Image (cartoon, rainbow, N blue to C red):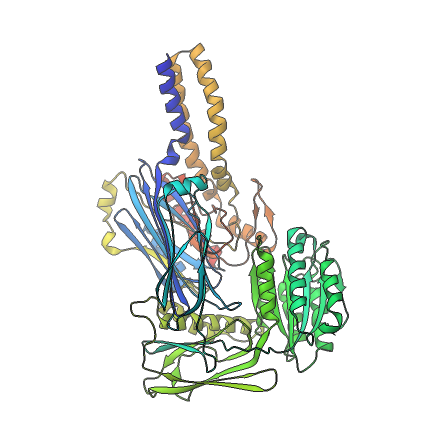
Amino acid sequence: MTAILLVAFLLLFSSICGGEDGVRYLEFHYEAEVVARYGRTRITSVVRNDLNESRLLQFSLKLPETAFISNFSMKIGERNFYGIAKKKSEALMEFRNRSESGENVGLVAQRTKDLFTIYMNTAANATSTFTVDYEELMYREQSLYRKTITINPGDIVDDLSASIRVKEPEGFSSYSTSDFASIDVVSSEEIVCQYSASVDTQRAAGSDGVSLVMSCEYDVVHPVDGAGNFAVNGGYFAQFFSPVVTNTLRINLVLVIDVSGSMGGRKIQQARESLVALLHQLHNDDYVAIVTFSSRVGQWMTNLVRVGSFRSSAVQFARNLAAYGSTGLDAGLQTGLSILKRSAHESYVKLLVLLTDGLPNEGISDPRVITDRAQEVTENTGISVNCISFGFDADFEFLQDLALLDSGIAKRIAESENAAEQLTGFLREIATPALAEVIVTFPVGSVEEVTSLEFPFLFSGSEIVVSGKFNESSPETITVQVTGQGIDDTVTYESIVSTVADTTIAGSLPSTERLRAYLKIKNLLNDKRVAEINGENSSSIEQEALQLSLDYNFVTELTSLIVVEEMSNMTTDEDTNSNDNADPTLVSACVSCYGYYPGSAGVQAALSSSSRETGYGLVILIAIIILLILIGGSSTIVGVCLCVRKRRQRRKVGETLHNEEKTSTELATESEDVKKEDVSNTSGVTKHVSEGSIELQPLVANDDVLDHTSDVPGSPHVTETSQDSKNNNGALTSTVGTVENDLQ
C-alpha cells in the first residue's frame, strides 16, 4: 500500500508541476559593441523543449528609447525566419496575404518605443534560437557615455553571459563598470566589460535567477581646442564636438513643478532634493522663478529674481513642496511661460523646465490644445521648453512635442532609488549652457547627405554630433569650422580633417555609415513632427525618412519588419500534411510603452496564478489521496490522478487561447480607452498604453499576453505556457484583423 501511495503521489505531482520543467533555457547572451559612440546590441537566447508538445514562450525586451531594431531572426529546429524592412502599409498587406494563405509569418511594427515582446512556439523535442539586434547612439551626458545592459532572463540559464566592448579611436580618459562585472583593457582604444553567472550563482539569487543592470561608463580624450573629434570610415564621417567651456552662459530659468497627489511619497521627496541641489549650483547672476501646479497654481515669486539675492528663500520654498490634488498642467505651464516672457533678461538664455509624473486632468487637458497654446506664447521668443517625465505614467509623446517647439529636450526619469541623482544630473546639465546658436560649417561642395548643422544650445558635459559623407571630389583635407555664442562674444573652433584616412578600428561593427543613417532618420522624424504640429506638409520629409529606414532595415514609425521563413526551409503541402507532428510556429509580439497591452488580464492572470495553484492543489490533493486510500483503494487513486492530468492539460490550452475570441473591434475599442487613462483589470494589474508601440503581432500565439518586466532598457524576460498547435488555423482571421486595427 505504501508503494502504491508513493507512485500515485508522484504521478499527481508531475501532473501539476511536470510541464513547467520541460523547457530549459540553455543560453542567454547579451553582446554589445560600441564603435565611435555608435553601438549595436545583440541578444541571443537558445531554448530547449524536451516535451512531447509545443510550448509557448514569451520573450520581453525593453529597448532604450533612442534605439532602432535592425534585425529579428529565429531558428526553430531546422527552420529559419528573418525580418525584412518594408513600408508599414505594405508590410501589413504582405502579412495579411501570407497569413491567409497559411504561411508562417510575423510582423514587427513600431507604434512608439520601449517594450519588445515575442511569443514563440517552441516545437516539441526541439531547440529554438532567437536573436534581436538594436542600434543606438551613445549620447554624452554629464561628461560621460553610458552603455547599459539589463541581465534578467527570468529563469535559471545553463549558459548566461554579457559583454560590452567599446572601441574609441581617440582613446579613453576614464572608464568604469558595475561592481559585479570585470573590465579588461585590450588597448588604449578598446575596453571590454564582462559578466557571467554559473547556475549555482543564479540559483542563489532566487528562483527566477539574476536580475542585474550592467553598465559601462566612459569618456574619451577630447581636444582642448578645434572642431572636435572625427571618425571616418568608407567615405562617411562623424564629428563629435564637446569643447571645454569653463564660463557658461547666464540663464533665465523657470521651474514648473507638478505637485499633484500622484507625486506624493518618494517622488516629491526626490524632487525636493533635486531642486535644492540645483538652486545651490546656480550662478549668483542667474535668474530663477518656481511655479507649482496641482488643482491650483502656486508661485514662489511672480517674476524672475536674481539667484544671489534670493537663493535661501528659493531653497526653503523647494524644501516645503507638498503633493495634493489633481494635475492642472496647462495652467502651470502658461504661468511659467508668462513669467519668462515678461521678466527675462534679454541677453540671458531663456529656459523653462517642466516636471510632471502624470496626465493633465484639471482645466485644459487635451495635449494638442496645450501644445498649441504653448506655441502661441513661445513663437519667436527664444524660449526653450524642456520636459521631464518622472516615471512612466506621463504622456511622453506629448512632452516630446512640447520640447520640439524650440529644440528643447525631453527626458524620462525612471522611478527608482537613484531617481534624485538622475534628476539632479539632468537639471544641472540644462542649467549650464556652454554655447548658444551653434553652427557647423564645411567647405562648399565637400560633403553630402549631412545631418543637422545648426543647434540652439550646447550644454556643458554634452556633445554635438554631425554625420555625413565626403564627396568624391573633395580634397584630401578640408577645414571644418564651428561657431557659437559664448558668454562674452562669438567663439570659433577650427580643425583640419582628412577625408581619406580611416580612423575607426579594423574589424569593428557597426559602421559610421549606419550612424549617419540612424542620426539622419532621427533628424527627419523630428522635422516631420514639427511640420505636423505647425500644420505644414511633411510628405517629402516622410518619404526621405522612409527610404533611409528601408535601406538600413530599421524599424521606425514608418516601417515594419515582415518576418518570413527562408525559402530553403519551406516544405511542400504534401510534406506538411504527411507529418502529424508538424508545428507551425510563429510568434509574436506586442510592445507597449512601459505598460500592458489591452486585454492582457485573462492570460496574465492564468500565468501568474500557476504557482499558487501548484501549492494549494498539492496540499488539497494529498488530503484527497489519503481519503481515497481509506475509502476506495489504489485503483481509484490512479484513476483520479490520470483524470486530473488530462483536465489540467485541457485547462492550460484554454487559458492560453482564451483572449483569441476577442474581435478586432473589441481590441481597437480597448486600445482607445487605455490611451487616455489607466485601467484596472480583473487580476488587479494596472494597464496603460500610450499611442504607439512596437508590435510583433502573433500568427498563432495569443496576442494579448504581456509580461511585466524591469523598467530599465535592455531587459528581457521569458515566461511559458502550453500551446495546442492544432488551433493555429482558427486564429488566423481574428489575428490579422487585430493587426490591421492596431497599425492603422
- Which picture quadrant has residue 427? bottom right
- Which picture quadrant has residue 171? bottom left
Place of residue 70 in the rendered image (x, y in percent of width and height, measured from the top left): 38, 62
In the rendered view, would you say 45 is above or below 328? above
Camera-side residue of 350 and 365: 350
Looking at the image, which residue is at 42% across and 25% down? Answer: 644
Q: Residue furthest right?
A: 302
**Relative side of 486 to 744, left or right:** right
In the rendered view, would you say 369 is above or below 195? below
Place of residue 535 in the rendered image (x, y in percent of width and height, measured from the top left): 57, 74
Camera-side residue of 677 and 444: 444
- Which picture quadrant has residue 369? bottom right
Camera-side residue of 356 and 210: 210
Place of residue 157 in the rendered image (x, y in percent of width and height, measured from the top left): 37, 44
Place of residue 433 in the rendered image (x, y in percent of width and height, measured from the top left): 59, 75
**Relative side of 243 to 395, left or right:** left
Q: Is residue 216 visible?
A: no
In the rendered view, would you say 440 is above or below 65? below
